[in-house]
Amino acid sequence: MNFVMGTVTKSFLRYLVRRKSLTLLQLMGIAFGVAAALGMGLSALSALASFTGAIEFLQGKSTHTLERHAGPLNEQILKEIMHDPAVHSFAPVIDRRLRYGDGASIRLLGIDPFLDSAIRPELSRRSITGAPHRDAREGMSFLIDARAVLMEANIAAALGLAAGGRLRTSHGEIEVIGTFPNPSGEPLLLMDIAHAQEIFLLPGRIDRIDLILTDEEGFLSRWRQGFRIRSNRQNHDTLRAMLGAFRINLEALSLMALFVAVFLIYNTTMFAVVSRRRDAGILRSLGAGRGEVVLAFMTEILILGLAGGALGSVMGYLLSRFLSGIIAGTVSNLYFFLHPLPLPWSFRMLGAGILLGCGASILGSIYPLVELARTDPVKSLSGRAMNRRGGPAARKAAAIGLGITLMSASLFLLPDGSIYIAFGALFGMVFGLSLMTGYAVVVCTPPIRAALTCLGGIPGKIAAGNIRRNLGRTAIAVAAFMVALSLSIGMALMIGSFRESLVWWMSGQLRGDLYISTATDKEVPEGFYFELLEMRDIAGVDAYRKVQITYRNKPMFVAAVNAPVLQRHTRFAWLAGGDEHWEAVKRGAVIVSESFARNFTIGPGDAITLEGRNGPAELRVEAVFYDYSTEHGLVMMDRHTYLKLFADSTINSVAVFLEPDHPRRRQTLDLVRQRAGAYDLPVFTREEFFGNILAIFDSTFAITRSMRIMAIIIAFFGIAGALMTLFIERQNELGILRALGFSTGQVSLMTLLEAVGMGLMSFLLSAGVGTLFAVVLIRVINLRSFHWTIFFHPHLSPYLVVAATAVLASLGAALYPIFMVLRTYPQMQIRAE
Amino acid sequence: MNVPVISARDLWKIYDHNAALRGAGMEIARGEVVALIGKSGSGKTTLLNLLAGLDSPSRGTIEVEGQNLERLGEKGRTLLRRNRLGFVFQFFNLLPTLTVFENVYLSLELAGISSPENAREALAKLGLGGKERRYPHELSGGEQQRVAIARALVKKPALILADEPTGNLDTTTGRQILEILTTRCRESDMSLLMVSHSPTATGFADRVLSMIDGVIVAADTGGAPMHGPAPGR
């Protein structure tokens, strides 16, 4: 039996070599699909590994952290901590960021090298002794010199800094006195905590205390009120939770690329089945069983899956190195600092790629294999065309597709707002709509025929007919291309709508004339804030403070604002009601963002309990407002309420408001800039601030752009594959055309117009499906992922861009088939078989 | 009493209310060469497909070496084709990705006979020695058909079914092929049923049958039909 399988399998596998171009197309389609899925997965893993590695490195041997709910701690607390029976060891920490160069960010850890020796022995030892064999004076430099830092070795090498080197930062110049290895790879500076207090203007204050506890319960019972005590596990989980929705969306995007690849595999596998039908009939007539023929073909599929998966794993690995930088940048911009640590190549990645490739190949081949098993040897030997699926099959597929689409759509109406169900429903819809493509091609044929005839005369007419007649080939290619183009349109519309919503929100909520120290790590000294308050000609100053806390075990944010100033100078976007809500805020109520309201099912009139310095405090929710600053939710309160609750006078940034028609407007603004300059605080105009926000917004979607491009590349292979198979299958037909007097140019034009026709149909269908996709993304996916409303702002530009993409991709896909026509058509004859 | 190699009775095959066979029947004895002639569309190929077990009759029975095809089931019919039947087609139907040798050897492998020498011998006997490594597209039509005949003969089946074996060849080559095919069959005591629309085949046969509109008429018996009553009547 193995021998028989050997020859039967051999007869199939040699087609891979014979039809190199098709094999290559199929291989590339699988490879790109695997690359997209694996690349995204690896880059997410890399980010997670970096994130986990960095946390573990920084945690050292500590078991818990103690900090205030908001703001820094008074270092006097250390005296009490020291004597707590549950504390085995403790170390105060200042954990901040510096910017340097072109705005790159680096973490600075202020430590007490003596107390820290129990928590992070390697680092603290390094800090005291410095480089080996150095003298005592240099070893003490860390403690004595106010600007002395130890720098992590990798970043030091990247910046070309060694001991004695200096670096200009947002908080002044620092001197590198040595380097240290950091297995997590995160850029890190170590500084004596006293010096860190100076440069960050935190006299007598620290950010947190890292602890080694021997009795967690006992410690919590004594310290719970007024402080946030978290185990390492809790810290890790909180940070992970912050990435939750972001990761899910990324994974869904990569699966979409794989989905398109599966379509492509189906297309080329179907063709392979069709071209093997005659061989299958011969084998059956010689006495080969159905199973033997199917198994031989499956071997071919698995070889392609293996080769494509292997290639895809390498491509995916390279892609992940590119994507992990983008992901880390996005996470750092939106959530918390993350430095990517590209994963080293391992053969597990090869294994994963092969598994994905084979899995996708088998999935895409199920139906073709069933078709092959059901091959009627009589029909296949007689050469009767089974390969050209006509109207009835397309109608049947469309009916099934419609059913799947409607069922999937109904899932959106389920009360359980699970994001996984939403994504599942979205995929179901896309699949269902893809099944309807064949029928849609039939329906679209008359207008397409008119268009192609207009473009190319008789060759155009024949081209349209060919597309219609070879539905089994063309419908799948059109479906795959349609899915990729729809993804592009849908994402572009969603991103465009999001951008418009963001601009609308900014225009209402961010109406300051100047923004000082926004989106930087530099805090605004309270003294400067008071200076601004006393300046004449300034209509209002809003001191903004934003801090991340935990509410019902989920991360969210609290913001302190100057309610009277915002009431007067901004136009908040309320879900209901208007600026009258500020009155309640001035009296101690809070307003919550839409994300908070949805995330925690809180509405106006409800009460929320926040842990303050004096224990739990109940706050009444006055209203809900639209907000895009964080998907985890924001509770906003007046600064007085915040100070009462947390006694944290930190100011992250300040907004300065002037009367619009103030006669000395320019001079006042210049004066503010000057005063801010004295504190080395960055100042932005409203336009610059908007620009910074939009730049972050645009960079956030860099990943989706990459995935969209991948999907289109994959679908491009689908169109190219379809054209090649049409060319190969229709050799006899082309011989007839030649006999009738068609020139090479006319047949080339026909091939080109087949491509254009398929591209055009894909675009027309994607216009509708893509718009639907956008609506689902906006009204369902985004809402369930990020809990905020995006207002739909349809634009023409995504459709135009996608139309151009469709035409260009189609033209590109036609190049090789046209080359084949030019090369072989002049020799073609009518053959009986 | 010798069991006929193949026996068909009252065969009907109906497609979409059109009957391709209308109660056809026939028997072929061991070692007998029979030619079945008829015009295109008369039902010859349909009959061959039924006899090979590739298709099922709407009504009637077929027995190959005493075994009822219907009762054998799909697996049994596959084994029958593998071991006891050989096929020669009009369009050769060689597997294009296998060499000449591999095409012939495949037949042996399917029959469970791992004997490459037999394949080479079969090719040599048909004048194809030295061409074992060529691919079908590198051969002429006549050579391809000889490969197909070698493939059919090599496993020494009880019966060879040849569907228009010369239909795609010129007259001279066609005659050569018929000569080879019938001679080899007689040498090996294999039965042969040749279906053709060309009268040339009749000169090589022991017996000639005619197919007219789905009915087999024995050409030697003055046109008396060989069929049974229609189904449903």
Image (cartoon, rainbow, N blue to C red):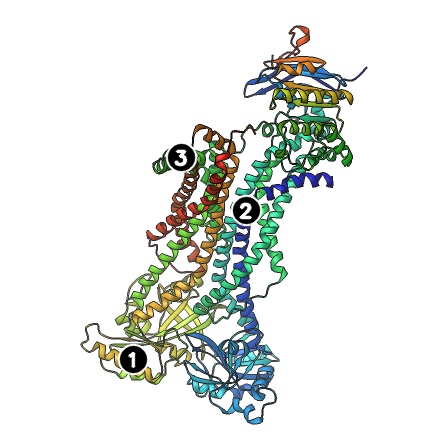
Q: Tag 2: Cα neighbours inside 10 Å, few (<14), some, or many (≥20)? A: many
Tell me which chain the residue with mark 3 is part of.
A
Please give the label number shown on residue A26.
Answer: 2
Estimate the spatial distance between the alpha carbons at disc 3 and disc 2, rounded to whole Å: 28 Å
| Residue kind at label 1, given as amino acid type | Arg
At numbered mark 3, what does the secondary structure look like: helix, strand or loop? Answer: helix
Q: Earlier in the sequence, mark 3 or mark 2?
A: 2
x and y percentages locating residue B49 in the rendered image: 64, 24
In the rendered image, residues at marks 3 and 2 fall on the same chain:
yes
Q: Quadrant of residue B95?
A: top right
| Residue at 31% in and 67% down | A509
- Circle 3 residue: A459
Looking at the rendered image, the quarter that the C terminus of chain A falls into is top right
Q: Earlier in the sequence, mark 2 or mark 1?
A: 2
At numbered mark 2, what does the secondary structure look like: helix, strand or loop? Answer: helix
In the rendered image, residues at marks 2 and 1 fall on the same chain:
yes
Say left or right for B211 vs A429: right
Farthest residue in the left direction?
A663
Asked if residue A398 shows in the view, the reply is yes
Q: Quadrant of residue A510?
A: bottom left
| Residue at 65% in and 19% down | B195
Looking at the rendered image, the quarter that the N terminus of chain A falls into is top right
- Marks 3/2 in contact by CB < 8 Å: the verdict is no
Say left or right for A792 vs A400: left
Total of numbered circles in the picture? 3
| Residue kind at label 2, given as amino acid type | Gln
Farthest residue in the top direction?
B222
x and y percentages locating residue A171 in the rendered image: 41, 82
- Circle 1 residue: A673
| Residue at 22% in and 74% down | A659
x and y percentages locating residue A728 in the rendered image: 52, 37
